[in-house]
Image (tube, coloured by chain):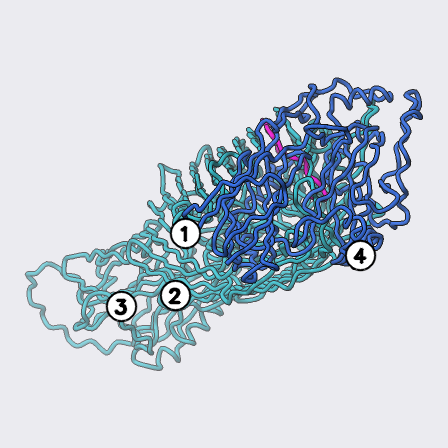
Amino acid sequence: MARRIPKVCTVLGSGLGSTLALGCAQDLPPSDLIVDERILALRVEAVEADADPVRAEVLPLQRVRIVPWFVGLDGPVETSVVEAEYQPLWIGCALPPLTGLFSCLQSKVPLDASAIPVCPPVDPSALDPSAPLQNPPSPCRLTDAPAAVPEFTVPIDSTFFFGGDLEVTMVAHRPGRGSSEDCLQALLRQEEMLPEECLYATQRVPIGPDDQLFAAAAYVGVDLGDPPPATDPDTHPRITSFAVERFEGDTRIDGPTYLNTPGETVELAAGMSLNITTVAPETDLQQYFTPADEGVWDPRLEDYSGRWFRTWGTLLSPVSNDPTSYNTWEMVPNEAQEEPERPAGNIATMYYVLRDGRQGVDWFWFHVRITE
Amino acid sequence: MTARRRCFIVARLVRLDAKARLLGLVATFCASSLSWEAVALAATAAAPAGDVLERLVPPVLQNSVEVAYPPDLASSSPQPPAGQVVVKYTVGLDGVPKDLIVETSVHPELDALALSAVAKLRYSPATLDGQPVEVISRIAIPFTAPEPEPEPEPEPEPEPESTASEAPPSATTESSLAQVLAAGPGIVRLEGNVVEMGQRTPLDRVTVMVVPAPADAPTGFVRKKDYGEQPAPAWQATGQTDANGRFEIRDVPNGKVRVIVLLPGFERQEYIEEVTEGEAVTVKYYLERLSTNPYRTVVRVDNPREEVARRSITAAEINALPGTQGDALKAVQNFPGLARSPFSIGLLLVRGTGPNDSAVYLAHHEIPQLFHFGGLTSVFNSDILERIDFIPGNFDSRFGDAIGGIIDVDPRAGRRDGYHGYVDADVFDAGFLFEGKIGKGSFALAGRRSYIDALLPVVIPDDAGLDLTVAPRYYDYQGLFDYPLGGGVFSVRAFGSDDRTELTAANPNEIDTDERNQFETTSYFHRADIAYEKRKGRWEFLITPSYRYEFFQIKAVNQVNVDVRTHNLTARAEFRYHLSERASLLVGAEYRSFWFDLDISTPPPTATGGSTNDRLRTQVRGFNASPALYTTLAVNLGDTFTLYPGARITYYSPPYNTAVFDPRLRFGWQVAPKTTIKGGVGLYSQGPEPVESSEVYGNPRVGPEQGLQTSLGVAQAFPFGISLDATVFFNYLYANVAPSPYAIYEQGESVPEPEMYANTQRGRIYGAEILLRKEFTSNFFGWIAYTVSRSERQNDRGEDWVLFDFDQTHILTLIAVYRLPKGWQVGARFRLVSGNPTTPMLGGVYDASSDNYVGVYGQLNSRRLPVFHQLDLRVDKKWTWRRVGLTVYLDVQNAYNAQNVEFQNPSYNYRQQAAIASLPIIPSLGVKLEF
């Protein structure tokens, strides 16, 4: 007989005592400062014409694309540049339920990269509901060549019917340094530090919605019991508004100025600040269900989670979590990070990524030209 | 408790014929120290600890010895030496006195005579529960110089008619004390009480000696004592206090007298009193104890529960140890066999096992929570603990559900010698203790509350974005009641603990905060026990039920919601029967059960740490029980070898629905009077954790964990309270529960489910422990504890063996405490410990689903953190007045501010890491007022 739920107590209790210690790790780089090429998001999109909103959840046999968002000091990296210079590889793995992302590929380590086959094409006409379900190899390469925005058909895998998802791992290299195959090999061996020139990212391709999945399972002869309540598929949120106001001290100079397209440039004198307001509709937050005990389904509501990144300057906060979120960006070097007096070319860039608590994601960015 | 008084008169008081030159003297062997101190007997001078002495049958003198005053010495000077020679000796198991020491010397020649006489005494040995034991005793042998041959008497002159009433003769006359004694029945001239300074406790067996003093000596306390050679006094009268601290001295002549008050362990005091005609002088003396703590518990008991390595710590040692703030459970962590706990948070890491693999028993029942907030201070007041035993392995069958070690804590009864207590305060909290007698019984009340909640809001900056809705605060309370009943002792105990905190961490750009910004935790328990213990003839029994209510709740940023309530009912019944002088049998039953009400909603635990959108939710009520039967036989095979075969059977109710049988065997072999070899082998089992066997979070098919423990040790006692204890051990764990990566098919199901956990892990642990210890006698105590060990785990067959998370190859602890004059005491503790294993970080993979990174690591626990080293210092100053005592202490942890690495904190992308250091230098000032 166990004594209590002690591990949580112990960890949290000790965490109370060591919280201050954790907060004192000042020598580590902040996550909101962009100093090099980075991936800030991978967006899963169901391939559908004129979809609005765009689905972030797919069923087996449906087409899906993965859109990566590479950013750098000068702004997002063009898709053509990603494909030509970053050469990302895409590995798919059937992720069991109740396991963390990346655990599918991690569980195969050590593995030789050459042993990972290309995923076989999915032929729906070959499916025979009376025959045992044949799962595709896991892991496998979703594309037979590097691709900036891979597009593929979601296979049928029994793992999906039991609550699992498709784990997609992207492996790329920085321009002019190394190769994506070498980076993949290093990741699959895990014998040494992962090379600096390698970029790795993983994303969950959710299979659902569950009620439709249950029907798909029945089609192929798998009985999952009573389906959950019907819900709409998970869709991506939409940043509907991005506005800036110029401030000098506590005095508003002008604004709000609405930035209608990503990538616009705002001019601002050094020392001044921008108050930023962004809006995502509360109606884009969807209700969904998670399984509880004994076939009971627990309703939950999505939640916004905003992340703010910059290449230079001082942010009030790197996070926000409301449909209408605010931030302040001061055009002064961040002393904690020992930033230079001015950004390169006097251009600073801000990136904003909005997530909805599931797989929905949207992003925005703009530049600031520092004037005297 | 009253001391027994027996006086064995083995010779006659002989009065010399005045014409005889030779004299026979009297050896009146009066066993003046009549509360026998048994070696290894738990007794307290001021705090009677149960009825141990009631079970003790003192030794019985079998012969007599006469001692003659040496003629040469008698004629060596006009005033030959005289007085009482006090000899301290041990009555051995064979009834022969040994370890003779002269405690009060009169003259070397007389001392030698006394020693020779005592050495010739023969006893039947003392017994405790029918077993022969050694006892320490003292004996005062008075030596009176013979009277010189009187000169021929002149013709007597007619005496004037006396009109005055017959006055007591004065010592200024030439008459001897013997003539004074012959004048008639003794008249009380000096009477009074002797109590302990600061405690007001009556002291018994205090020797009060009265000798003449110069007529011009000022009355009162003698401050300047002349310890040089003094001429023998013309006369001497001696008395002794009784159990109430009261004494009477008779037949003291009028005039100034010097009163010498003596008791071992207390400061000698002298007073000048004036005895006047027709009056008895009434006095009250306050003796100051030489040790700093009124509670004395003494070492181990050689009883049928003797484990291979049972290490005890006394209350005095607990309060003196640097770096532990007088906390008993933290003090135990200085013993070998316990790994160092990160950030000193109080994890019990016994012989390479995890923090949940060991158990702490308080008054025969397990307690759920040892420390407030994971390690600040223990939940039970250390000053009302009689004994704390740490058993790192091969523990007796009465303990179960643990594959590591045991800490067995016994609360003591409240003091019956008046009303006492204290209030104390330090940097973190304040507490009190109040105890005293109720009729024939006693009570003790204690409590403690933190004031961190008052300090933190002042310290935390306003712009930190941290709103402490309920600042961290804790309190605990204890209430004990003991009463003799029907020949046994009836006890009632109630205690509890409460920890809470609630904070809101808002981002600077948030307009409103909600539950996504909140963190809240509440943890409390309340427990009530009753117990009845009785010894009658060959039987002893114990029965004790206990009820405990526990509540634990945590809400963290709308992700984790845990609400757990349990009602725990446990009971223990034990019977011990002394089959003969050489054997005793213990049979017992322990029943443990709890009703639980869980409401938990959390993301599932993930091995890699990557994100998941899954959530697990369970709301369940249920019941669990694990009754157990146990037995241990203690049998002496010969005079020096004792075997302890035992067994424990435990049944685990559904979902486990399984029983485990744990046979155990220990032995003790006294190969020499002060050398004992001990060993043990046995099976030990423990139920899985609730999360591991949960229908939702775990695997209800997992079963109890089991382990084999073996150990072999030697204990050697040296003079001056020094002992050496060395033990080697090997433990093998099998059927441990570990996370499982597999999916399994339930019977009748076509859909596989994640197994979550399985009993596939094995562990192997081996090493050696050495403890060189000096008991707290005279002015110094300390110890050197060293452990060398290795602890490994294998999650499943075919996998590699890896170091256990808390494996620490070398653990060295040096402790020294020295008592200085005038109430000062200084202490130091130095620790040198191998760094904990760590897993090298190779980099990170960006988890785009949650905007975090998943760490990629090398081989598990393949490296070590740097060596840990730390010095803790402590200084105490105690003032003792007549009715109260005040102690002020300064405890400095990490005196030279060593920057020991506790773990490596990775950067957001796992490309860099920064060392997180252990606690910095922390001075702690405390004050304690006792009465």
Q: Amino acid at mark 2?
A: Trp
Which residue is tagged 2? Answer: B824
Q: Is residue B859 left or right of residue B519?
A: right
Is disc 4 placed on a helix, strand or loop? loop
Is disc 2 placed on a helix, strand or loop? strand
Q: Which residues are magenta?
A: B589-609
Say if mark 1 contacts mark 4, CB within 8 Å: no
Say if mark 1 contacts mark 3, CB within 8 Å: no
Chain in blue (letter):
A
Which residue is rendered at x = 31% and y = 52% of the image? B200
Quick check: do tags 3 and 2 share a chain?
Answer: yes
Q: Give residue A173's position: percent from left, percent from top.
A: 78, 54
Closer to the camera in the image, B883 or B525 = B525
Which residue is rendered at x = 67% and y = 21% of the image? A296
Which residue is tagged 3? Answer: B211
Which residue is tagged 4? Answer: A191
Distance Cα–Cα, label 1 vs label 4 = 46 Å
Q: Tell which tag, 2 or 4, sits nearer the viewer.
A: 4
Looking at the image, which residue sits at the far bottom? B76
